[in-house]
């Protein structure tokens, strides 16, 4: 059964956190959507790439890693993450949510078999830190950022930045793009 989720508006959350090897120093992600009376659902993300048809296999992405990489090069990382200079794609891949979760620590609540596309870029990035009394928070800066896309809808699910080194290792294998 297909349920549609409707949100009156998207609320962006900016989280500044340090963490383990998958350091997500700054993350921008839409808030979760809840159907009235229903269970919590994952956020639909923000419109980005228009998929060309939807494959019948639910585990197959409707966008390619190349489309996701080109979107990031054309539009930047997005959210409240600022960048300067040229972006260089470090890696772009489409894989299951379970695989992506192992590499970056989150998939924004997607089921393990959901197709996602991840783009990691190198450049100069910054995002304002948490506020301190009577002053703006210090900026968090770094050389790497990543953008996560829903592989079925082409929506941007999350953008994170500001790790000093590449936030995830090269994957051993990934699901090929259609």
Image (cartoon, rainbow, N blue to C red):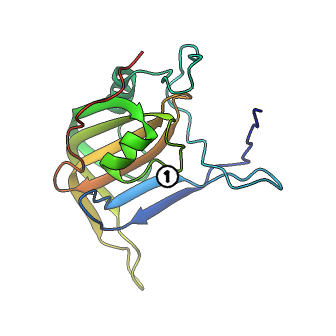
Compared with residue 50, is residue 11 higher up or lower down, i.e. above or below?
A: below
Give 46 or 173, whichever is nearer the viewer. 173
The image quadrant where one finds the C terminus is top left
Disc 1 designates what residue? 29
Which percent across, then down, holds residue 114? 51, 35
**Secondary structure beneath label 1:** strand
Compared with residue 129, is residue 7 higher up or lower down, i.e. above or below?
A: above
Looking at the image, which residue is at 39% across and 32% down? 95
| Left or right: residue 128 compared with residue 47 | left
Res 88 → quadrant: top left
Residue at the far bottom in the pictured view: 133
| Left or right: residue 18 compared with residue 58 | left
Which percent across, then down, holds residue 38? 79, 53
Res 97 → quadrant: top left
Number of numbered discs visible in the structure rendering = 1
Which percent across, then down, holds residue 25? 31, 62
Which percent across, then down, holds residue 70? 34, 24
Looking at the image, which residue is at 41% across and 76% down? 131
Looking at the image, which residue is at 24% across and 37% down? 171
Q: Residues within 10 Å of mark 1 (few under 14, many from 20)?
A: many
Looking at the image, which residue is at 37% across and 42% down? 100
């Amino acid at each position: 059964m297909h349920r549609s989720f409707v949100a009156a508006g998207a609320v962006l959350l900016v989280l500044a956190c340090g963490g383990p090897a998958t350091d997500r120093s700054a993350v921008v992600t839409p808030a979760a959507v809840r159907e009235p009376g229903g269970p919590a659902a994952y956020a639909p993300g923000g419109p980005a790439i228009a998929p060309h048809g939807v494959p019948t296999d639910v585990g197959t992405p409707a966008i390619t890693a190349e489309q996701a990489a080109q979107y990031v090069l054309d539009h930047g990382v997005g959210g409240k993450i600022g960048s300067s200079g040229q972006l260089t794609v470090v890696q772009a891949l489409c894989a299951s949510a379970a695989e992506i979760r192992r590499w970056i620590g989150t998939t924004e609540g997607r089921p393990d078999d959901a197709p996602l596309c991840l783009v990691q870029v190198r450049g100069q990035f910054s995002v304002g830190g948490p506020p301190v009394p009577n002053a703006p928070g210090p900026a968090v800066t770094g050389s790497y950022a990543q953008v996560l896309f829903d592989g079925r809808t082409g929506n941007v699910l999350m953008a994170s930045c500001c790790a000093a080194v590449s936030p995830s290792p090269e994957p051993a294998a990934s699901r090929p793009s259609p």
